[in-house]
Amino acid sequence: MRYTIIIAALFLLLSCKNKDEEIGRPDPYILTEKNISEDCSAYQMRFKDGKYIFNFALSGTCKKIKAEDYVKEYSRYLKFYNDSLVLRKGYILIQYYGIHSDIKDFQNSIINITKRNFKTKVSLVESDSDFFIIKVGNGHVPD
């Protein structure tokens, strides 16, 4: 029993120490959000380092969202943050639940807007029913 208490106390002490190291450390991303319809917001997590450039996703019930609204906000986001994004190479995660349109046309619109803003090759890497991942640039992606 005594050993169990000592081991439990040691475990708690070590786990608290690990969490203390995280306090005060800046987040590895910048989070922004904008309403794009009355029941839906687009949020973006722009990563400072690594293989992902940003995540563009929806939040809310998003029952009234249209593909055009999403594409328009995505385009606005890329134009607004062009200076900090244009030199980055890596992956962009696009999450689009609630959008009921031709997904291939929607993906092509996002890819074409990304090509135009990054001025480099953009390719579809992975696709699922609620998200897809595109690769920006044709070289090595940083870790």
Image: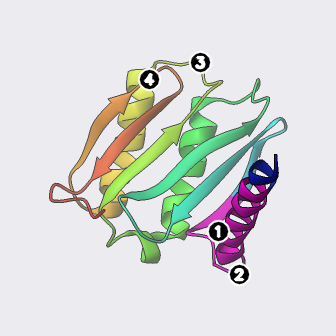
Going by the numbered disc 3, the residue's amino acid type is His
Horizontal arrangement in the rendering, residue 9 relative to residue 52 (left or right): right
Residue at horizontal 61%, vertical 24%?
99
Mark 4, secondary structure of its residue:
loop
Foreground: disc 2 or disc 1 = 1
What is the spatial separation of the Cα atoms under label 3 and label 2, in whole angstroms? 42 Å
> Is tag 1's residue or tag 3's residue first in the polypeptide sequence?
1
Q: Which residue is mark 2?
A: 24
Name the magenta segment's main secondary structure. Answer: helix
Is residue 29 found inside the magenta-colored segment of the image?
A: yes
**Mark 2 and mark 4 residues within 8 Å of each other at the beta carbon:** no
What is the spatial separation of the Cα atoms under label 1 and label 3, in whole angstroms? 44 Å
Give percent across and percent down for residue 5: 81, 53
Q: Is residue 2 above or below residue 83?
A: above
Q: Quadrant of residue 139?
A: bottom left
Looking at the picture, the colour scheme in use is rainbow
Residue at horizontal 44%, vertical 77%?
83
Foreground: disc 3 or disc 4 = 4
Q: Which residue is mark 1?
A: 18
Mark 3, secondary structure of its residue:
loop
Foreground: disc 2 or disc 4 = 2
Q: Which residues are magenta?
A: 6-32
Give neighbour class at mark 3: few <14, some 14-19, many 20+ (Cα, 10 Å).
few
Q: Which residue is mark 4?
A: 128
Going by the numbered disc 2, the residue's amino acid type is Gly
